[in-house]
Amino acid sequence: MARESAEAKYQRMTEFEREIWAGGLRAAGIDEAGRGPLAGPVAAGCAVMPEDMPVLGVDDSKKLSEKRREEIFERIMETALYARVVMIGPEEIDRINILEATRKAMEEAASGAAGCVFLIDAVTGLSLPGESRSIIKGDAKSYSIAAASILAKVTRDRYMRELDEKYPQYGFAKHKGYGTAEHIAAIRAFGPCPEHRRSFLGNILGGRV
């Protein structure tokens, strides 16, 4: 099968956006990064991309290498009509639960994009300043959601690399807080740090969180 060109990918991934643009409206993508890790914040990004300045190469952040994500992140930041990332930390995640923390981050990230049509990757129950449409696996289907996923992922990964300098014993720069065998072994050896989500650690620490 022939490899999809960057231009063809852009055309495919702007199908939802082009419908919105045709109505004279702006599309805003929302996506999150970091719902599953044992440590660090959950991050939500919101991106409003212009119709006339395509950023080729935008894709689901999980499909891109770290280097490529960083490059495209900078291009999105230079091009976007609106771009914001909000992170909710471990203490609040433990207090209100990860789903509510994700919703809160998404709502805050989108708060400055009033009047847009919001495209969201399967998170419901959001209070947004405009019409919203849910797209299953939207980060692989929508240009705006994919851009938001890159914003959230790169911002969170950068933060986890900073945490690695503060807490080098856990290896945050490598696994970004996810529950790898190496990370779990470090938690058991050193105990949790303030950046760990206590509500996620019950099985690891036998309920001693």
Image (cartoon, helix red, strand yellow):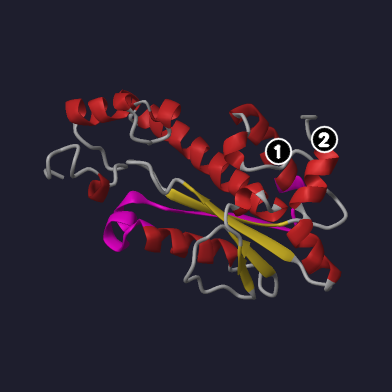
Few, some or many residues within 10 Å of mark 1 (<14, 14–19, 20+): many
Task: Please check the rendered image and state whether residue 87 is part of the magenta-colored stretch, yes or no.
Answer: yes
Q: Residues within 10 Å of mark 2 (few under 14, many from 20)?
A: few
Which residue appears at 33% of the width and 55% of the height? 93
Q: Quadrant of the C terminus?
A: top left
Mark 2 = which residue? 5
For marks 2 and 1 on the same chain, the one whose residue lies earlier in the sequence: 2
Q: Residue 129 at what x, y percent from top left?
A: 61, 75
Q: Measuring 48% from the left and 60% from the top, which residue is drawn there?
A: 105
Q: For residue 72, which numbered disc appears in the image?
A: 1
Magenta residues?
77-98
Which residue lies at the image location 81% right of the left edge and 37% below the top edge? 6
The image quarter in which residue 136 lies: bottom right
Local SS, label 1? helix
Residue 14 relative to residue 130: left or right: right
**Residue 55 visible in the picture:** no
Instruction: State the residue lying farthest toward the front.
Output: 1
The residue drawn where x is 59% and y is 48% is 149
48 inside magenta stretch = no
Question: Picture quarter containing residue 175?
Answer: top left
- Toward the right, the furthest residue is 52
